[in-house]
Image: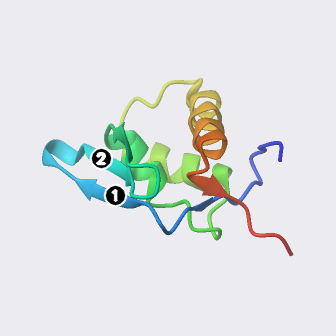
Amino acid sequence: MELSADSRPIANPDLILREEFDDWAILFDPVAADAFGFNPVAVFIWKRLDGRHTLADILSELQAEVEEVPPDAAEHMHEFVNDLVKRGYVGFEMF
């Protein structure tokens, strides 16, 4: 599926997000025994991948919460979520 600002990605519920110090986290895939490090912005995005938030919603919330969001933040967020989709960490509900 091609990502757009209206996409409503859903985090794989089988994955475990373990929050560490300073808002960093580890995302663990128990099936593949694989781990993925998340910085605070990635954690912020991950927590909103619930199928209710669009990528545009998430970007708006990020801009409201964080000072100095770079102008190309939407592009970086799409790349990040696309990578999660490729890894099988994120999907989409089909209606």
Please say if 49 is above or below 64: below
Q: Position of residue 77 (x, y in %)?
A: 57, 36
Q: Earlier in the sequence, mark 2 or mark 1?
A: 1
Q: Position of residue 74 (x, y in %)?
A: 62, 34
Q: Which residue is mark 2?
A: 26
Which residue corresponds to the image point at 56% horizontal and 52% vertical from the top-left? 89
Q: Pointer 1: residues within 10 angstroms few (<14), some, or many (20+)?
A: some
Does dot 1 land on a helix, a strand or a loop?
A: strand
Q: Which residue is mark 1?
A: 17
Spot the residue most to the left. Answer: 21
Please say if 58 is above or below 66: below
Tell me if label 2 and label 1 are in contact, CB under 8 Å: yes
Q: State the scheme by which the image is colored.
A: rainbow
Does dot 2 land on a helix, a strand or a loop?
A: strand
Hey, what amino acid is under mark 1?
Leu
Instruction: Using the image as rendered, state which of residue 54 and residue 63 is in the foreground.
Output: 54
Q: Name the side, left or right, on which 7 lies relative to 85.
A: right
